[in-house]
Image: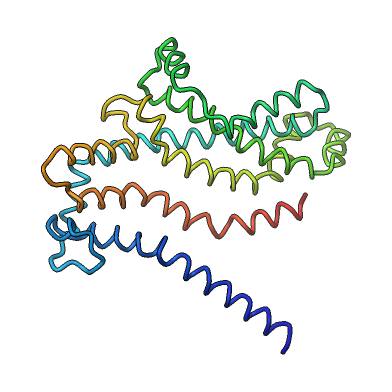
């Protein structure tokens, strides 16, 4: 048996095993979510996997968009996620370059404190007090500042390790040619670190888009609610009734997750090739 045949069989075996593992934990819950979002209330309440006997797909999704504060919550999520990604990516790349090139104990201490934010969540009460002092409590701006600050450590950690592999000769050659620090960062460091920043951005998008804990405490009312918070408010209003509107809740979950799925489909083919290209450049 040739080596190519053995490699193909190993690949097929891995795919089969992963497919069998994903079936009960990914495929079935996803199917349950999608199929019940298209059923009327009496069928969706049974939480079964069968196709709808009576289709209510359009009515369910139209009701969620009309009564579930979906469009406003979608706008609020975008107004938080997009600036967070932009600010964190740029500032984290700058900080990572400084940390990777500095040999001082102060820079190492600052790096460790920054990275420590990955495992130590910020205290909610001091955060609320600080936002109240700045008169930003309950605003999208205050929530954005918290998201940007708490997510900085992840991207700094990824980018610092990558920049350490970049030869200093590139920067020294550019400096000899008369390039300043800003030019070196913009023309050399940032393009090289883009693959890692892309991966960090995907992590940021998922964590920021799905953030519920901070949103519940830092955003007040439906006007500033993000999609996860709007989903919670919609489900809570349904829970006050005698019967949960499972069909509408499932439809809201689908619409809340849809932007993340679209981002994943757009980005997933670019992550691994981008990392490979960045590694070769480094």
Front residue of 239 and 37:
239
In x, y percent, where is residue 32?
Answer: 29, 61
Front residue of 230 and 19:
19
Front residue of 245 and 266:
245
Q: Which residue does the image show at 43% across and 16% down from the upper left?
A: 131
Q: Which residue does the image show at 17% across and 56% down from the upper left?
A: 45
In x, y percent, where is residue 241?
Answer: 12, 40
Question: How many numbered marks appear?
Answer: 0
In x, y percent, where is residue 57?
Answer: 19, 59
In x, y percent, where is residue 60?
Answer: 18, 53
User: Would residue 122 appear left or right of 159 to someone viewing this image?
Assistant: left
Front residue of 154 and 10:
10
Direction bottom: furthest residue: 1
User: Would residue 58 appear left or right of 187 to someone viewing this image?
Assistant: left
Dividing the picture into quadrants, the one containing residue 3 is bottom right
Name the quarter where the N terminus is drawn. bottom right
Direction top: furthest residue: 133
User: Would residue 261 appear left or right of 158 to someone viewing this image?
Assistant: left
Dividing the picture into quadrants, the one containing residue 223 is top left
Q: Which residue does the image show at 60% across and 37% down from the upper left?
A: 154
The colour scheme used here is rainbow
């Amino acid at each position: 048996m040739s080596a190519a045949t053995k490699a193909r069989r190993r690949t097929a075996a891995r795919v089969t095993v992963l497919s069998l593992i994903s079936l009960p934990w990914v495929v079935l819950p996803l199917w349950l979510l999608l199929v019940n979002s298209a059923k009327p209330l009496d069928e969706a309440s049974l939480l079964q996997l069968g196709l709808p006997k009576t289709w209510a797909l359009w009515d369910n999704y139209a009701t969620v968009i009309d009564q579930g504060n979906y469009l406003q919550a979608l706008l609020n999520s975008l107004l938080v996620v997009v600036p967070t990604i932009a600010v964190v990516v740029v500032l984290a790349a700058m900080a990572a370059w400084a940390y990777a090139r500095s040999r001082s104990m102060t820079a190492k201490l600052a790096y460790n404190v920054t990275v420590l934010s990955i495992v130590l969540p910020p205290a909610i009460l001091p955060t609320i007090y600080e936002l109240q002092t700045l008169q930003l409590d309950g605003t999208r701006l205050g929530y954005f500042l918290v998201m940007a600050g708490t997510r900085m450590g992840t991207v700094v950690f990824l980018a610092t390790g990558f920049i350490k592999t970049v030869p200093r000769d590139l920067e020294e050659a550019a400096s000899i040619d008369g390039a300043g620090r800003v030019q070196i960062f913009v023309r050399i460091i940032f393009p090289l670190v883009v693959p890692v920043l892309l991966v960090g951005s995907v992590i940021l998008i998922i964590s920021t888009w799905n953030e519920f804990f901070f949103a519940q405490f830092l955003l007040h009312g439906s006007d500033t609610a993000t999609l996860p918070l709007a989903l919670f408010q919609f489900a809570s209003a349904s829970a006050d009734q005698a019967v949960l509107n499972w069909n509408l809740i499932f439809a809201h979950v689908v619409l809340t997750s849809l932007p993340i799925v679209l981002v994943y489909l757009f980005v997933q083919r670019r992550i691994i090739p981008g990392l490979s290209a960045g590694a070769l450049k480094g």
